[in-house]
Structure formats: structure tokens, C-alpha cells
Amino acid sequence: MIVPRITTTPVQTKSVCFSRCETHRRMACALVILIFVIVVAAWRLPFLSNVLVGEEGTHAYLVLGPHPVIVDDNDGFVARVDGKDILESLQRNVLLYQFLDIVARQFGLLLPPCRDDSIACISLHGRAPFLAVFLAGLLAALFAVRRYLAFDRPWMLAVQLLIFFYILCAPLVVGGSIQPQIDGALGVLIVTSSAALLLSSKEHPVPYRYLAAFAGGLVGALGKNEWAIALAGSAVALALLSAGLTLASAANQRDWKAVRQGRALCIAILTGIMICQWLLYLHSPSTFIAGLDVMLWINAMRLSIIELVRDSWNLLYPVFLACGMMLVLIAICLKKYCLKQPSVVIVAGWAAIIVVGYIYSGWTGDGFERYYCPPALLAAIALIYLVGDLHYSRGILCAASAALVLGIGANGMSLLRSYSHGLTITSLPGSSLAAIESRYTKLASRYTGVPIFESSAIGIYYKNIDFVARDLGVEGAKSMLQRLRPERPPELMVPSQ
């Protein structure tokens, strides 16, 4: 009777110990995540009332007001003619805009209504839903890396969190997270959710592992066409690298089982991508094809890569730095990561391919490179895993932490400068917010019944004026007026710059 008591008691005690340790770990993880999300959100609050600029009004329209506004494939607020709001297709997958119109709009409804219809209040209502979507993406990213956070190594944990915060507090990502657009908010939610599914595949037994990879591919292909293409390219590259590196190894060191498992993972991802793209095509063939046409149109312009890097370096260098470090760390142990952690390589490759693709295009848009926000978060996720896999002395980790703190300080100073000088941190970065608001006010006060050629934001703030968005160009604007009012000349009031 004594023997069972002696043999079972230590096991029970050990089990209780492990249970308590796991509970403490989960509580610590939850607390860290909560504090982290609060700090990230607070970093952005001063900019929520910034006046809307350029196309931001077109997208803010999708989250303002109590009811959805999209009709068929017409999802972009581009004009108001004779008091009627005009929506036209934004030439991208319409499902993205329907998400904003139906889901993100609900976040805006939680805010108290604007009693005075001030520009600052309307701007906050137009930006806050996008911040909420971004924070949902941040939670997905934290879920993706939760098992890779080094809670048992405080200095390493500090480095991991500082890396993540350095990316999140970069002016590019801060601006993208509050900008009424697709990339910086919804784009981040899509890619981080996909990355969370891909990285979770390692935690499941074989049948469910491939189901998670399939779901990751499916979710990752919900966004822009180029994101889906980049994810597919990363999966194919992983499969080829795994086979090639194995063939290059000595015969007794070849792990063909790992190669087959990696290949099956890639097939599951590619299957998810193809099914999602097919469903998006069935949902709206015209907008799906239009998204591909936009890519071809930009490529045909043969824009300068050098000009892109030169003009946008101040915004983009944190993304380049993160991607470069990520690729170096993978290259050091390329075979190991390809065979043992294929999902991490796929996530890292996805980030790199998106960045390379956008650099190759040379596209600068309105001067704010929000297109690099999704790969920035993917690179941060990959870096947290890769850095946590390293074992350095406390001195090196202290030095790395100090360097990251300096980088965060530089990001903070840049944002503080923009805030104190009243400069936009999103579209047309560095422009005077007061000057933009003043222009809207003057144009609205001088309105005589002739549609104003101005950005869509003016129609958000002043609902009693007609306008046509500048994005259409003067000839495009007149063509629209001619189509909508064939019995009248296409009069257009074009303000001087």
C-alpha cells in the first residue's frame, strides 16, 4: 500500500507544477499582449483627427454613417452630382471594400456621434474603424508569434518585443494603420491572419497540419492579387529549395520525409490560394480582372526604381532593414529552416517577394507607400521567430536592445515633428493639415452650384456641395458629368493649386 503512494505522489506534484507554470505563462503572455496592444494604439491616437487627404475620403465614405453604401461593384465615392452621391468601381477585388462597408462600419457606430459636424470629429470617425481593423491584425500577429516569445529568457523577450515595436511605431506603419485605405489596415489583418494559420500548422498532427496550411493559403489570397501571387511564389520557392538543398547534401544526410512534408504543405497552401481566387472571380469577375489589369498597367509604365527608393527612403528603410535581417538569418541556416520550419520560410519569403515586387514596379502612388505595410508585419513576425532561435550573451542582447530603443526614438521624433508642425503622415506626407483644411473650407464657401474638382474628402465634410474627385483627372471628370447630365454642358470648377 505504501509503494503506490510513493510512486504516484511525485507524479501528481510534478503535474500540478507544470500546470501552474503553464497557467502563469499564459497569464504573463496575456498581460504582455494587452499592454503591448494598448501602447501601440495610444501611439496612434494623436493622429486620428487629422484631416482626410486625397483618396482617403473615398474609403472613409465606406465606414461613415449607419448603413452600407456599395451597390453592385460600385464601391468608390468619386463624385456628388445634383446632390446625389456617385460611386464607381475602384478596380480592385470588391470583397475588400464590402468588408469595410459592412464590418468596419460597425466599429464607427460604436463611437459617439459628431454633434457639431466638425472636421476633426468627422476625421476621427473616418479613421478610427481602420485603426480597429489594424489592431485586429495586430492581435492576429501576436497570436502567430505567441509560442515563439522567449518568456524563459527575459533579455531575448525584450529584444523580440522591441523589434516588433520598432516596426509598429515606424511612421509608415503608424500612418498606414489610421489611413482610410486597404493596405495598412485590412491588408495587415489579412496577411497576419494568414501567417497565424501557416505558423500554427506545425502545432497540429499531420492531417490537421495541412488543413491549417490550406486555410492560411485561402485567407492570404483574400486580398489584392499581388499578395496571392507572392504567397504562391514563396510556397513554390520553398518546395524547390527543400528538394535542391536535400539533393546537394550527402546521401546519408538527406531527409526526404521532411521534403515530402514540406511539399505537401506547399500543395495545401497553393490549393487554398487557387480556390480563394476562383471564388473571388465568381463573386465579381469584373473587379477581379480589373485588379490584374491594374498590375499590368503599372508594370507597363516602366517607372523608375531609383526614384522610388530616393523619394520614399525615409518611409521605407525600416521595412528594408527588417526584410534584410530576416533573409540573412534564414540564409545562415537555410537548409535547417526549409526542412524543419517551412512555414516560417514561407512567411518570410512572402514578405520579401511583396517588397521586391513593389520596388520593381516603381509605384509611389500619392507619395505614401502604404503598400509596404503588410510585408512589414510579415517580416516582423518572421523576425520574432528567427531571433528567438538564437542564443547570444546578455551583452549582445543589451546592445541590440539599445540600438532598437534608439530606432524607436527616431521613429517617435519623426512622428512628434509631424504632429507638432501639423503635417500629414499619410497621403501627401509632409503637407500642411491646416492648409488642406483651409482649402476645403474656402472652396465650400465659394460654391456656386458648379461641381468642384477636388479630392473626395471635401464631399465627406460638406454634404451640400457637388464635386468630382481629382483622381479622375479633368477630362475624366468632364466625361463623367457629360454621361450623368447629357442635357447640360460639363461645367467644372477647377481651383488653382
Image (spheres, rainbow, N blue to C red):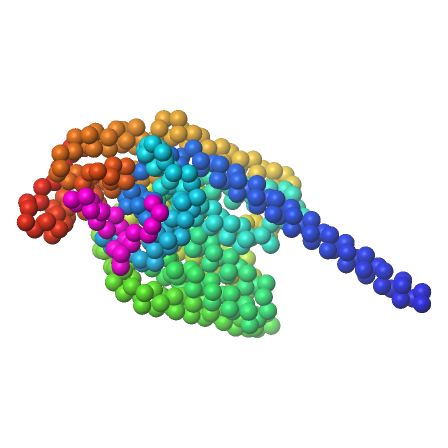
Residue 63: image location, x then y, percent: 35, 47
Drawn side of residue 271 relative to residue 388, left or right: left
Residue 194: image location, x then y, percent: 46, 58
Q: Is residue 274 above or below residue 317?
A: below
Q: Quadrant where the N terminus lies? A: bottom right
The structure residue drawn at horizontal position 48% and vertical position 40%, both measured from the top left corner, is 41
The structure residue drawn at horizontal position 77% and vertical position 56%, both measured from the top left corner, is 16
The structure residue drawn at horizontal position 16% and vertical position 33%, both measured from the top left corner, is 447
Which is nearer the eye, 347 or 290?
A: 290
Which is nearer the eye, 99 or 172?
A: 99
Which is nearer the eye, 370 or 363?
A: 370
Residue 130: image location, x then y, percent: 40, 45
Report if residue 78 lies within the magenta region. Answer: yes
Part of the protein shown in magenta = 65-87
Drawn side of residue 164 relative to residue 314, left or right: right
Q: Name the image quarter holding residue 230.
A: bottom left
Q: Residue furthest top?
A: 420
Q: Name the image quarter holding residue 250.
A: bottom right
Residue 372 visible? The answer is no
Report if residue 416 lies within the magenta region. Answer: no
Residue 42: image location, x then y, percent: 49, 36
Q: Is residue 93 above or below residue 123?
A: below
Residue 25 visible? The answer is yes
